[in-house]
Image (spheres, rainbow, N blue to C red):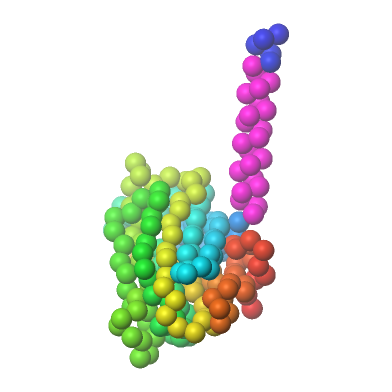
Amino acid sequence: MKRYIKLLIVFMVVITISVFLSISVLAAGYYPHYYEQSPPDWGQWWWTNGSMIVWENTNWWDDTSAVALRYHWYRGSDPTLEVEGYNPGQRIDCDKLSIDSVTIYNLPYTHYEIKNGDCPGNSPTFKEQVDIHIKGSDEDFHSGVWYDHWVKYQKVGTGNGEVNFSYEVASGCPNDCWLGKIQYDHSYNATCASPSGILSGLPGCP
């Protein structure tokens, strides 16, 4: 009887963990892509508007995408997450946010670079973009893990802008795999986010 109760408890714990993981994935936004490109499959974001802006960004790779990322890394293709505090597609919205600090919690990386956004006439004083170079070794990088990083920004403009998130790997996404964006109003409050579900409670952006 005791053995049966122990087995029942173990079974219930496994079911509870499985349900939790399923809810976590369903609550996230899916990044459309081809697996050989190797960007994350799912993401969850948080946008905190206080005295500064904090954009927390978590990402999850499945087995196939993680294998592809490790393959690219061993070939020297430098898989990189690009956190862009402006609109790189139209080359606008620079000089509205400036990176104050970058915190990388559990994502394995070799180094990161803080850079100026690519906007015409952009001030060199305010840095909008951080590139995180992922360490894709077998020992360090794994599938099924929510990898977390935060970027904190100073507010230096008048708001009404957009931030974007991309992934680059030389042999899979040489011109970036675009993964999503957040648009914010004049008070820096997030108004929409794409892909749908990436930022809880907000609609997708047009």
Q: Where on the picture, by quarter, is residue 73?
A: bottom left
Q: How many marks?
A: 0
- Taking depth in this image into account, of 182 and 32 the one nearest to the observer is 182
* Residue 25 visible in the displayed image: yes
Foreground: 23 or 46?
Answer: 46
**Helix, strand or loop: magenta stretch:** helix
Residue at 66% of width from left, 47% of height from top? 23
Vertical relation: 33 (above or below) 127: above
Residue 151: where, in percent of width, then height? Answer: 42, 64
Residue nearer the viewer, 26 or 199 = 199
User: Residue placed farthest to the top in the image?
Assistant: 1
Up/down of 31 relative to 143, above or below: below
Give the image location of residue 68, x and y in percent: 43, 53
Residue 77 appears anywhere in the view: no
Quadrant where the N terminus sits is top right
Q: Where on the picture, by quarter, is residue 100?
A: bottom left
| Residue 18 in magenta stretch | yes
Percent across and percent down for residue 64 are: 49, 50
Q: Is the residue 168 above or below the residue 184 in the image?
A: above
201 versus 13 height, above or below? below
The location of residue 53, given as percent across then percent down, is 48, 69
Q: Quadrant of the C terminus?
A: bottom right
Which stretch did the figure color magenta? 6-27
Front residue of this view, candidates 114 and 137: 114
Residue 130 part of the magenta segment: no
User: Residue at point 30% right, 83% down?
Assistant: 124
